[in-house]
């Protein structure tokens, strides 16, 4: 029972960290795409 309570307490934190990871990956992906497009634009 206590283990379940601890799990429920930490579950939102774990999800938040995962979502932050996805957001960072998404931003880096967009930046990379813009960078590549910019690089080819200069050629």
Image: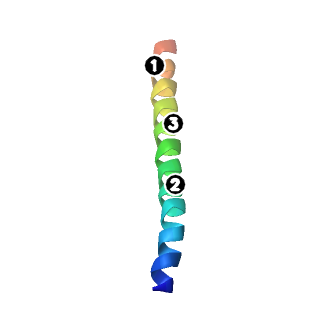
Q: Residue furthest top?
A: 42
Could you tell me which residue is drawn at 52 percent across and 13 percent down?
42
Residue 32, position as x, y percentages in the image: 49, 33
Q: Do the residues bearing badges 3 and 2 touch, measured as CB atoms within 8 Å?
A: no
Where residue 40 is drawn, which disc sits there? 1
Q: Which residue is mark 2?
A: 16
Within-10-Å neighbours for mark 3: few <14, some 14–19, many 20+: few
The answer to whether 40 is drawn above or below residue 14 in the figure is: above
| Distance CA(mark 1)–CA(mark 2) | 36 Å
Q: Which of these two is toward me, 26 or 1?
A: 1
Q: Which of these two is toward me, 41 or 6?
A: 6
| Distance CA(mark 3)–CA(mark 1) | 20 Å
Residue 26, position as x, y percentages in the image: 46, 39
Within-10-Å neighbours for mark 2: few <14, some 14–19, many 20+: few
Could you tell me which residue is drawn at 54 percent across and 61 percent down?
13
Residue 17, position as x, y percentages in the image: 53, 56
Q: Nearer the viewer, mark 3 or mark 2?
A: 2
Where residue 27 is drawn, which disc sits there? 3
Task: Report helix, strand or loop for mark 2.
Answer: helix
Task: Report helix, strand or loop for mark 3.
Answer: helix
Q: Looking at the image, is mark 3 or mark 1 earlier in the sequence?
A: 3
Q: Do the residues bearing badges 3 and 1 touch, measured as CB atoms within 8 Å?
A: no
Within-10-Å neighbours for mark 1: few <14, some 14–19, many 20+: few
Q: Nearer the viewer, mark 1 or mark 2?
A: 2
């Amino acid at each position: 029972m206590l283990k379940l309570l601890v799990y429920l307490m930490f579950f939102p934190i774990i999800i938040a960290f995962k979502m932050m990871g996805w957001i960072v990956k998404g931003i880096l992906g967009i930046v990379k795409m813009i960078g590549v497009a910019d690089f080819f634009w200069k050629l």
